[in-house]
Image: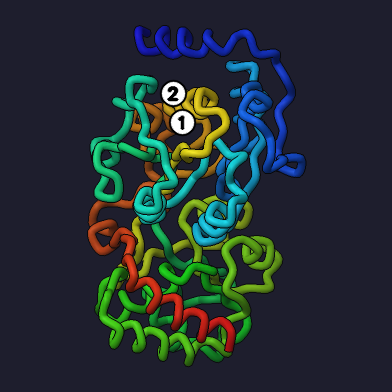
Amino acid sequence: MTNRRQFLKKLAALSSLSLTSCGWRLADVRANSTISEQRDQLYIYTWTQYTDKELLKTFSAQTGMKVLADVYDSNDVMLAKFQAGGGSSYSIIYPSDYMVQKMVDKGLLTEINHDRLVGLENLFPRFSNPSYDHNNRYSIPFNWGTTGLLYNSENIKNPPEDWEYLWRNQEQLNKRITLLNDVREVMGAVLRMLGYSYNSQNETEIKQAYEKLKVLKPAIAAFDTDAWQNQILAGDLLLAMCYSADAVRISQENPKLKYVIPRSGSSLWTDTIVIPKTAPNPSGAYAWINLILQPEVAAQISQRLSIATPNRAGFEQLPKQIKDNINLFPPDSLLEKCERITPLGEFNEVYERYWTELTSS
């Protein structure tokens, strides 16, 4: 109760702001908006499906702020927008773990003042001092999961067990598979299949992965992170490389769609919440993070959006069938084979060069 009172006390400082209705897309954001113009509104930049109108309404009801969200489908798109100067309206962003390190190195993020947070102790221990951001200096974990394959079990009788399945069944899958539009995920998966690290810095290994992908390329319908979802539901696709959060949600709409973590290993990722240095409404940003850290809110988000919460207190409030869902919360035996994607510095140019050659040919 003490933490709850402290949270409400901190939000009371925002009570002078008028209650407004919630928004959804950032169609009306102006790059030249002043800080004073944005004290009663909060702009966030997030992944598709990471927020909904219910969450936005809850925030507005608690703070009196109007909150609007815009979405992106890859870390690279988000970073490119910021580096081009298009991110100055946002006070909250949701980069993945390895992108946090990259944004810190580029001087884009504000160090988070933990004294302004309520509920940080609610996190699972493994998220309290992550390797990508020691002591959560610049980021707060929001969701975590794996990358794998979602397949139609009605049409695919022998389920895929590893990435190699795509090559062995290339003719059957022709133009009915998609891979993520993410160089590190796609190259990393093939590297892992070949027995290398997701984060290899050996150009010979990168080239081997590229050559394997070049063989598969004619069978790939698209490199896509979001549009595949409607296509696989419609039956146009047989299989898609995807994030576990998306797989769980889509399989709820069609139980014949099954998710598998490839046995040779995959990526283990965490998507986070950060405050950019250019944030026009830092107070609103802290209020948003404090809302997300509330156990009951974390549990509600996990249920509504089908995501794996890193909030231990929130996890304990989930129904048993959700806590036992191994696609959302895999056992350690599966997680041991997964790797976090880490920044590669200048070597990233090698990945980008092969990726450009693959996707443009």
Q: Given contact means CB atoms under 8 Å apart, are the residues at marks 2 and 1 in contact? A: yes
Query: Which quadrant does the C terminus fall into?
Result: bottom right
Kindly identify which residue carries mark 2. Answer: 294
Instruction: Look at the picture and state if 134 lies above or below 190.
Output: above
Q: Quadrant of residue 196?
A: bottom left
Q: In the shown orientation, is residue 197 left or right of residue 169?
A: left
> Along the horizontal axis of the image, is 58 left or right of 119?
right
Where, by quadrant of the figure, is residue 225 drawn? bottom right
Q: 36 or 303: which is nearer to us? A: 36
Amino acid carrying label 2: it is: Gln
Element type at mark 2: loop
In the image, 252: left or right of 205?
right
Q: Which amino acid lies under the numbered mark 1 shown in the image of this protein?
A: Ala
Say if 221 sits above or below 298 in the image: below
Per the image, label 1 sits on a secondary structure element best described as helix
Query: What x and y, as percent, mark residue 304?
Result: 57, 37
Q: Which residue occupies 58% across, 84% down? A: 360
Question: Where's residue 352, x and y in %?
Answer: 45, 76
The Cα–Cα distance between marks 2 and 1, rounded to whole angstroms, is 6 Å
Does residue 27 appear to the left or right of 298 in the view shown? right
Answer few, some or many: residues within 10 Å of disc 1's Cα (few below 14, many 20 plus, some between 14 and 19): many
> Whole-percent x and y of residue 329?
36, 47
- Report which residue position mark 1 lands on: 298
